Image: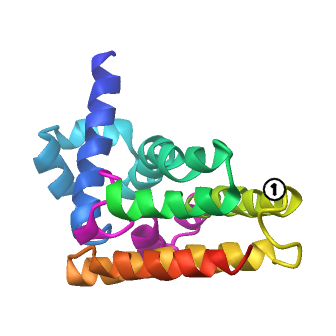
Amino acid sequence: MKKAAATRINILQKAFELIYVKGYKATSIDDIIATTQVTKGAFYYHFKNKDEMGVAIINELMKPVLTGSFIEPLQKGGPALDAIYNLMYHLLMKDEFLKVEYGCPVANLTSEMSPWNEEFNNVLNEVTRQWTKLMISTIEQGKKDGTIRKDVNAKQVTMFVMSGYWGVRNFGKLENSRSPYVLYLKQLKYYLETLK
């Protein structure tokens, strides 16, 4: 990797870590420069401004990781309801990228940035739409193969499961504990059973 590319990725990684802990608005360019130990000139060589860097963090760092965590497990196939439960269990109880004390980085950036930055809203929405579409399709496949009742509305189930996930991430963050996750997962398992 060339030096310029290595510097850019270093800025993105360190900036992501700061933003994940402190929040986007509370993280200044000076904080990022101090953490990465690059000059202001080097920062502005790679990014016109903080928002351009923020969008690059989502596109270049978060999307690949989130695709591996949120998307690929559902693409493996198997019984749909098991796949959904196992995905949620892994995201909440096992995934090392998603820290309990800081919540979900997509949810954090969505609540902090979407109301006032259209570009952030668009790239974050793209990640969420991909996850939504795949979960709907997983449920529809379950209906086709007979593991999910035909009358189940796949979009409603998807919204319910995803909303619960985003919400419980906030409860976990507030308590700095996985105990809300355990409660959510127990109820999720019960709910998914009702779809058979």
Give the camera-side residue of 31 and 22.
22
Q: Magenta span covers which residues?
A: 95-123
Please, which residue is most extreme toward the top here? 2
> In this rendering, is residue 164 above or below 131?
below
Q: Which quadrant of the rendered structure holds the N terminus?
A: top left
> In this rendering, is residue 19 above or below 180?
above
Q: Position of residue 130 (x, y in %)?
A: 67, 55
Identify which residue is drawn at 49% across, 41% down: 64
Q: Quadrant of residue 94?
A: bottom left
Q: Quadrant of residue 195?
A: bottom right
Q: Is residue 105 magenta?
A: yes
Name the amino acid type tagged 1. Gln
Residue that mark 1 sits on: 141
Q: Is residue 11 magenta?
A: no
| Circle 1 SS class | helix
Counting every numbered tag in the picture gives: 1
The crowding category of the residue bearing disc 1, from other C-alpha atoms within 10 Å (few below 14, some 14 to 19, many at least 20), is: some
Q: Position of residue 161 (x, y in %)?
A: 59, 75
Magenta span: chief secondary structure: helix
Q: Position of residue 71 (x, y in %)?
A: 59, 49
- Left/right of residue 156 with respect to residue 126 in the rendered view: right
Identify which residue is drawn at 70% across, 77% down: 157
Identify which residue is drawn at 63% across, 58% down: 131
> In this rendering, is residue 163 above or below 45?
below
